[in-house]
Image (cartoon, grey):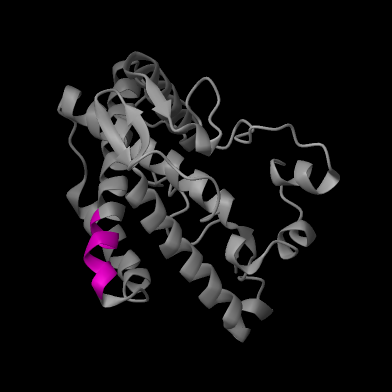
Amino acid sequence: MTKRLVLLAVAGTSLLALTGCAQSGNVAAHVGDATVRTSDVDFLSRMQCDTLDKAAADPAQAAQGGAQMVATSRIRTTMVNTLIQAELNRQLAAKDDLSYDTTTLRNVMAQFESVVKEVPTADQARFRDLVRDIYRGQLQVYTKAQSDLASQGVEEPTQDQVDKTIAAIQAKYRKSVGVDVNPVYGADADGVAGAADSSLSRAVSPFAKKASSAQQDPVWVSKLPAGQRCG
């Protein structure tokens, strides 16, 4: 079976905004007793925004539809969710002493290295380490899902079965640990950033309502100030 990783918006998929309300200290979220740092959220958001800006400036990628414009707020909330899930995976792996396929991780990181080399030299080691931690956690939970399915007599599960098992494992562990997200990221009761309105006032204008839309209108994004959009 193909070992497909769920790569959460680190290497070039769509994400959220780098400007906005002031945040409390360096805490983006508490995951149990652990902390997801705002500085890591901002760092990965900057890496993503730089990637989108370079794609937009590349005529070849633009011609092929590879460039996209995204509100930086969307990038940020996606990174919050990515880092929260990475911490949940890390804790779950430690609790259950989960293993992972080291060859798969090595191959994935080798492919990702081309992205790493595109960022400033001073940022490369940190970028590589954060992404490696995310991928490692995904592989560890993938291994647990396979083991759980095998114990149920499913030796050759479909990708859909694996995905649903992973989702169930993660959802159960999330509830047992507890996730408390900085209100600036607009989390819902389950601690999913971007799922609720983070503003103190209700959005009433059509322009304001589009800010919280699940599928943001490209025209709306293009009208944002340059510092609030990427790509």
Magenta highlight on residue 40: no
In the image, residue 116 lies at what x, y percent? 32, 69
Rendered location of residue 113, percent (x, y): 30, 69
Residue 27, placed above or below residue 135: above
Residue under the image location 76 percent in, 37 percent down? 203
Question: Which residue is at the front of the view, 116 or 146?
Answer: 116
In the displayed structure, 196 sits above or below 111; it is above
Q: Nearer the viewer, residue 151 or 6?
A: 6
Is residue 224 placed above or below 139 in the rendered structure? below
The picture places residue 84, in percent across and down from the top left corner, at 37, 36
Residue at x-position 31% and y-position 48% = 135
The residue depicted at 38 percent of the width and 32 percent of the height is: 156
Q: In the rendered image, which quarter is residue 27 located in?
A: top left
Residue at the farthest right position: 206
Estimate the x, y position of residue 136 in percent, counting from the top left.
Answer: 26, 45
How many numbered marks are there? 0
**Front-most of residues 182 and 88:** 182
Is any part of residue 153 visible from this angle?
Answer: yes
Magenta residues: mostly which secondary structure?
helix
- The segment highlighted magenta reads 122-129
Residue 193 visible somewhere in the drawing: no
* Quadrant of image for the N terminus: top left
Q: Is residue 62 left or right of residue 143?
A: right
Residue at 47% x, 26% y is 191
Residue 126's place in the image compared with 190, above or below, is below
Q: Quadrant of the C terminus?
A: bottom right
Q: Is residue 151 left or right of residue 96?
A: right
